[in-house]
Amino acid sequence: MKYIHLDEVDSTNSYLKQHRSELPDGTMVTAGLQTAGRGRRGHDWLADRGMLPLSLLLKNPPHPDAVTLCAAVAVCEALGKLFPQESFGIKWPNDIILRGHKLCGILCESVCFGSSIDIICGIGVNISQTAEFFEKANIPHGGSIEMLTGNKVPDREALAEDISERLYRFTREGFDAVSDEYKAHCLTIGKRIRIIENGNERETFAEGIAPNGFLICSDENGRFEVNSGEVSVRGLLVYI
Ligand code: BTN
């Protein structure tokens, strides 16, 4: 696996998008500081040096649709190995939650050319930002490992490599291979939630996860499935 570390970059995802044609499948990029990080649905991803940005280049992966959910399992496993006493949850589709706070966000982007597709999976792990950072940045539900547990991550590079290796392996196997583990970590299942689509909100019950990773919901009109690319999900009164 090729590994590139940059002291500072606008976005590790953008870096891989620009350089993907000259880089091999499985290239991982990390940075000390990301100055123009991007989040899901066009949001900014604001961070200081306390956040670990990492992006993995997957060239023509066999299960492109599974990458985003596989990434959530890879992060939970890698963090669970470092902090076995903690319980890392997944807010569908792929926010990683610790003690009610968002610890990590995942942004998968694809570049299609002819019948091929490259996926760039970007993962931002909050390692050591302080509570003041999240307050000032107006991210009330955000939290870092150090802030929430009082523990330090001994080696960021080793964590990034562990996440990427797991993710690369899972994407060869597909969502089937990790779906039981995904569901075991998923905090959304069994909750009443709000689905936000194009500014419209709809209250529903999250029943489970379909084999393709869609969220199975039900309300008075019956059952339906939602795709993570199209909606945003919130708890009724809280973030999760
Ligand atoms: C989210 O909105 O929850 C997704 C955030 C993804 C942030 C990561 S940090 C590394 C990579 N580079 C980016 O610009 N974004 C992703």
Image (cartoon, rainbow, N blue to C red):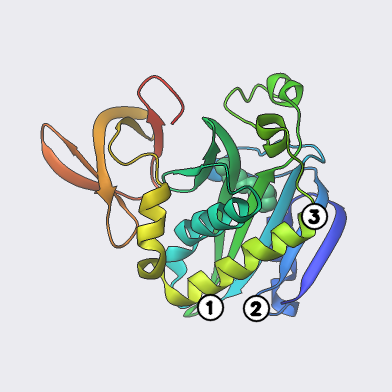
Q: Earlier in the sequence, mark 2 or mark 3?
A: 2
Going 47% across and 80% down the picture, which residue do you hit? 115
Q: Nearer the viewer, residue 18 or 100?
A: 100
In this rendering, the answer to whether 148 lies above or below 49 is above
Q: In x, y percent, where is residue 124?
A: 66, 47
Q: Mark 1 points at which residue?
A: 60
Q: How many marks?
A: 3
Q: How crowded is mark 3: few (under 14 residues within 10 Å), some or many (20 or more)?
A: few
Position of the C terminus, as image quadrant, is top left
Q: Which of 68 and 39 is in front in this view?
A: 68
Q: Distance of mark 3 from mark 1, alpha carbons? A: 30 Å
- Can you say whether 142 is above or below 60 in the image? above
Q: Percent x, y for residue 99?
A: 54, 31
Decide: is 211 above or below 215.
below
Q: Quadrant of residue 157?
A: bottom right
Instruction: Check disc 1 and give the amino acid type.
Output: Asn
Q: Identify the residue shown where x is 75% and y is 78%.
A: 22
